Image (cartoon, grey):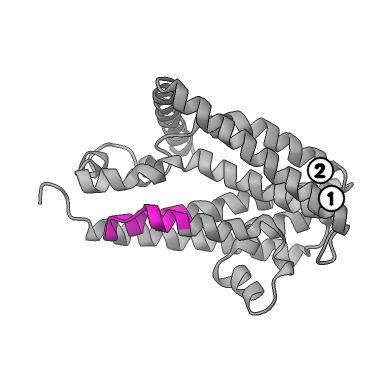
Amino acid sequence: MKQLVDKFKKYLRVYVKMTTNSFVIWLTRRSAFTIFLIGKIVRYSFYFGFLIFLVKNTNGFAGFSGNQILFFTATYVLIDTLAQFLFRSVYSFRQLVVSGDLDLVLVKPVSPLFRSLFGGADPVDLITLPAIIGVVIYIGSLLSPTILHTTFYILLVINGLVISAAFHIAVLSLGIITTEIDHTVMIYRDLVSIGRFPIDIYKEPFKSLLTFIVPVGVMVTIPAKALIGLVSPLGIISSLIFGLALLFFSIKFWHYALKKYTSASS
């Protein structure tokens, strides 16, 4: 147990150091930082503004009320922003591979997967996160959830991040094998963006595809439905098991990809 605690403290210190370095780099580019921050704020403002206008004029859709639709969208934005904040270094991983700098990562006494996945947080997302969390809490409170449903929601949001981590690990693995990251990440972003609305609005077989094959539903829709009280305990347990299984297989894929890696010194 003590070894696990010591290992956790070690990786926490490493993460704080990498995040600090990432923030310092961003602060040296203040103009770019300001532009990105303004862009994020404008994007979310227009996004929620349009959605509020839409649900007010339609009284919701797919059997959900206007506030429930807004909560689905707020949950999507929360999970997506948290994932971008935590896994931002995935977007620059290709440069490590093609330049041979991944060799230096592999020889360090830190897990290369940890370094590649959590190598640098995004301060722009950190600044917007408090406002997003505030929106989620406010809209969620309008739905009058119970403490149990709120607990289920928090667990499933964490599970959504686990699924997102599994996707990003798969992207890293493909990056080692194919040296291609950008297009794969964009495909992932496009697929996840489908979850901004409940997957119930889609017809079969697309709905089942988004639930069982491309688990956008498990990642985004089910957490929001859990807070509303539309998910059974069995559905929640199944979602958690599915998330852990996806993470397990993505890590296996990572180890397979490392065996295929050809270092710069080869």
Residue 148 seen from this side: yes
Q: Three-letter amino acid code at disc 1?
A: Asn
The residue wearing badge 2 is 139
Q: Are marks 1 and 2 in contact (CB under 8 Å)?
A: yes
Q: Residues within 10 Å of mark 2 (few under 14, many from 20)?
A: some
Q: Secondary structure at mark 1?
A: helix
Expressed as whole percent of the image width and height from the top left, the position of residue 88 reads 45, 41
Magenta stretch? Answer: 167-186
Q: Secondary structure at mark 2?
A: helix
The residue wearing badge 1 is 67
Q: Three-letter amino acid code at disc 2?
A: Ile
Q: State the predominant SS element of the stretch in magenta.
A: helix
Expressed as whole percent of the image width and height from the top left, the position of residue 207 reads 66, 73
Which residue is painted at 66% across and 66% down in the image? 238
Q: Is residue 46 left or right of residue 96?
A: right
Which residue is painted at 86% across and 55% down in the image? 57
